[in-house]
Amino acid sequence: MENCEALIIGGSAGSLDVLLRVLPAIRPDIKFPVIIVIHRKHGADSLLPELLSGRTRMEVKEAEEKEEIVPGTVYVAPSDYHLLVELNRTFSLDYSEKVNYSRPAIDVTFQTAAEVYKRKLVCLLLSGSNSDGVNGLKTVKEWGGTAIIQNPETAQVAFMPQQAKQHVKIDRILNIEDMAEFINLLS
Amino acid sequence: MELPLISDEQVEILLSDLLEHYGYDFTGYSKASLKRRVIRLYSLDKIPGFAEFRYKIINDNVYFKRFVEQITVNVTEMFRDPVFFKTLRDVVLPRLGTYPFIRIWLAGCSTGEEAYSIAILLKELNLLHKSLIYATDLNPSVLEKAGQGMFQLSYMKQYSENYILSGGKNDFSSYYTAKYSLAKFNDELRGKMIFSTHNLVSDHSFNEFQLILCRNVLIYFDRDLQHKVLELFDDSLEDLGYLALGTKETIDFSRISRKYKRLQSEKIWRKTN
Ligand SMILES: C[S@@+](CC[C@H](N)C(=O)[O-])C[C@H]1O[C@@H](n2cnc3c(N)ncnc32)[C@H](O)[C@@H]1O
């Protein structure tokens, strides 16, 4: 694997517990940003970054439009906007139609980042009940990036990683307890 | 490897075509979103090749209009972000109520849901009779829709919930009449709106306002263009007037920010004198 320039984690139903378990075990001095796109209700905006920042020494913040993406920082996609990665490694936000009934859609972030980071992108798809993220992982593979899923058998809701497994050439299938170590070894 | 349907270079070519042939300048828009829209349209319309796409846009006026409509994002709602509308209702509009006449500019109004929301607030505050809402957008087609004041009846449940959360006390359905699958909003609201095209990139200030709202438009612009547009707003706002942006937008980075004071936790700023 090439060295990693960005890790993006996408998830839906059942993924928050995974994050809460994995995040504390990630080394705070990792050399890449962690971008998190989780489906959730519109409105409860600042809660998720707050919740996550209690679990890590890395800076956790909501991704802002035009913000420069900095290594060692955890960015959370705001609710009700799509989060896109620009060629100049900044974020932009988009209030366009929902994709897979979701905004933010995991597909949108995976796909725009795929073209930017190419071989140096790692995307991890967690538990969830719809197929958001699957097309995104396809694009990631087309651009030479790495596609990883949570083991559907250990996922609270298997559908999302299961769909990815069926339709995409997945590089690694991880159990929750192995995720942090895998991430720590990326560099 | 399967390449994307349209490359960054091809997007640039289309943008310079638009500028050269139609005078529409999209070069200051955020690229990732724009490219997604272009690719979406390209596959939606099953265009056989890039050359054909380009030819159609340059030579077919009707298709050019479709192109502009489709690459801009027109999604909107009534009383979107209810807390924002609550602040308009409780703080901003009552203060403007002391003026003999209230001029409001709603820039990037899309299909008008926001304009009708504001008119409802003004009505409930007894200010509608002395107010005028100038609602502008780049796209003539969304303005035409806005002027009709008809929205999907099936959305009214959500809008009514938003309305109540924004502090609305009336029966929301008293503001419209149901017609088949549509809700037609009362003419009284429509009577205080002026719809017209205005391109924030190239058109100038056209009046002075006490309140300017431009929500979820600046996110599509790069920083340079954001600077420029914020200056246009500053030129168009009276002293002590208010500027309101979308939930994820800010003036903090801009040259005008030192003249403005933010209101509470909302994305509303007041111009100081
Ligand atoms: C996402 S909508 C926002 C609608 C509404 N303000 C809201 O927040 O719900 C963005 C609108 O901005 C308009 N727009 C985009 N570029 C523009 C420009 N250069 N000048 C004026 N309007 C523009 C689009 O046509 C679209 O209707």
Image (cartoon, coloured by chain):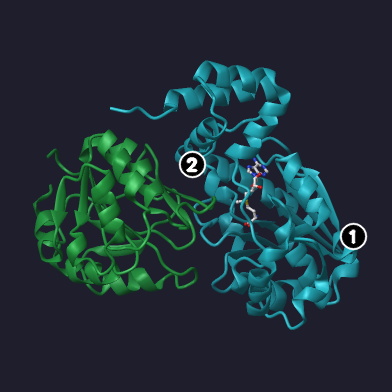
Chain colours: A green, B cyan
| Percent x, y of residue B85 | 66, 71
Q: Secondary structure at mark 2?
A: helix
- Image position of B255 with respect to B224: above or below: below
Residue in the image at 49% along x and 71% along y: A43
| Percent x, y of residue B70 | 61, 38
Out of B115 and B74, give the one closest to the viewer: B74
Q: Quadrant of residue B161?
A: bottom right
Labelled disc at residue B33: 2
As drawn, is B10 to the left or to the right of B99?
left
- Image position of B137 with respect to A14: above or below: above
Chain of residue at mark 2: B
Q: Quadrant of residue A87?
A: top left
How many neighbours does mark 2 have within 10 angstroms: few (below 14), some (14-19), or many (20 or more)?
Answer: many
Q: Quadrant of residue A111?
A: top left
Chain of residue at mark 1: B
As drawn, is A54 to the left or to the right of B156?
left
Amino acid on which disc 2 is placed: Ser
To the question of a shared chain for discs 2 and 1, the answer is yes
- CA distance for labels 2 and 1: 35 Å
| Percent x, y of residue B206 | 80, 45
Residue in the image at 72% along x and 27% along y: B62
Locate the N terminus of chain A by quadrant: top left
Amino acid on which disc 1 is placed: Gly
Residue in the image at 18% along x and 63% along y: A153
Q: Secondary structure at mark 1?
A: loop
User: Dot 1 corresponds to which residue?
Assistant: B191
**Cβ of mark 1 under 8 A from ligand 1:** no
